């Protein structure tokens, strides 16, 4: 299992995004902005999955955090209202529909 903080650390240590696909290849940019091969995949869908996950890793970490807070609230049956947390989860889910951050 990877926690949200571990996912953010992996993202920070990885080749910066956004990445893109070219056929069966996942491409990133080097320090000069030139495309470099990040992964060669057997299927185009594999490359697309890797690129999408890389480009949305920080948003996925935010979603993990938000879902964890909602779960904790439900378990504890706190007197507070979960609506702010649910709204944050909704906003985070909406961010997954956006293009990769630049």
Image (cartoon, helix red, strand yellow):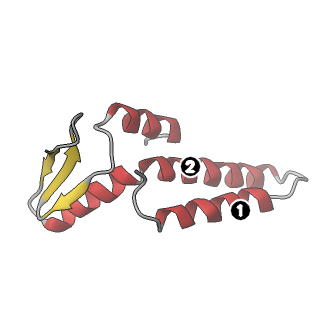
Locate residue 100: give its quadrant.
bottom left
- Secondary element under disc 1, as helix, strand or loop, is helix
Q: How many marks?
A: 2
Residue at screen point 11% across, 61% down: 24
Considering every residue shown, the one lying at the far right of the view is 79
Q: Position of residue 48 (x, y in %)?
A: 24, 63
**Residue 36 at x, y percent in the picture:** 14, 44
* Horizontal side, residue 77 vs residue 89: left or right: right
Q: Residue at x 91, y 53 (%)?
A: 79
Residue tagged by mark 1? 86
Q: Is residue 38 left or right of residue 102?
A: left
Q: Are marks 1 and 2 in contact (CB under 8 Å)?
A: no
Check disc 1: other Cα within 10 Å, few if <14, some if 14-19, many if 20+.
Answer: some
Residue 31, horizontal then vertical, whole percent: 24, 34
Residue shown at 17% from the left, 43% from the top: 34
The quadrant where residue 53 appears = bottom left
Q: Is residue 82 left or right of residue 11?
A: right
Residue 55: percent from the left, percent from the top? 37, 53
Q: CA distance from mark 1 to mark 2?
A: 12 Å
Q: With 100 as the anchor, is 96 left or right in this view? A: right
Q: Which comes sooner in the sequence, label 1 or label 2?
A: 2
Name the element at disc 2.
Answer: helix
Residue assigned mark 2 = 62
In this view, the residue in front, 66 or 22, is 22
Above or below: residue 82 compared with residue 9: below
């Amino acid at each position: 299992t990877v926690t949200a903080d571990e996912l953010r650390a992996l993202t920070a240590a990885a080749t910066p995004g956004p990445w893109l696909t070219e056929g069966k290849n996942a491409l990133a940019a080097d320090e000069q902005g030139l495309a470099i091969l990040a992964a060669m995949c057997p299927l185009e869908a594999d490359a697309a999955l890797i690129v999408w996950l890389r480009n949305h890793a920080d948003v996925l970490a935010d979603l993990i955090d938000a879902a964890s807070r909602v779960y904790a609230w439900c378990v504890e049956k706190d007197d507070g209202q979960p609506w702010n947390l649910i709204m944050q989860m909704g906003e985070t889910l909406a961010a997954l529909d956006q293009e990769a951050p630049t």
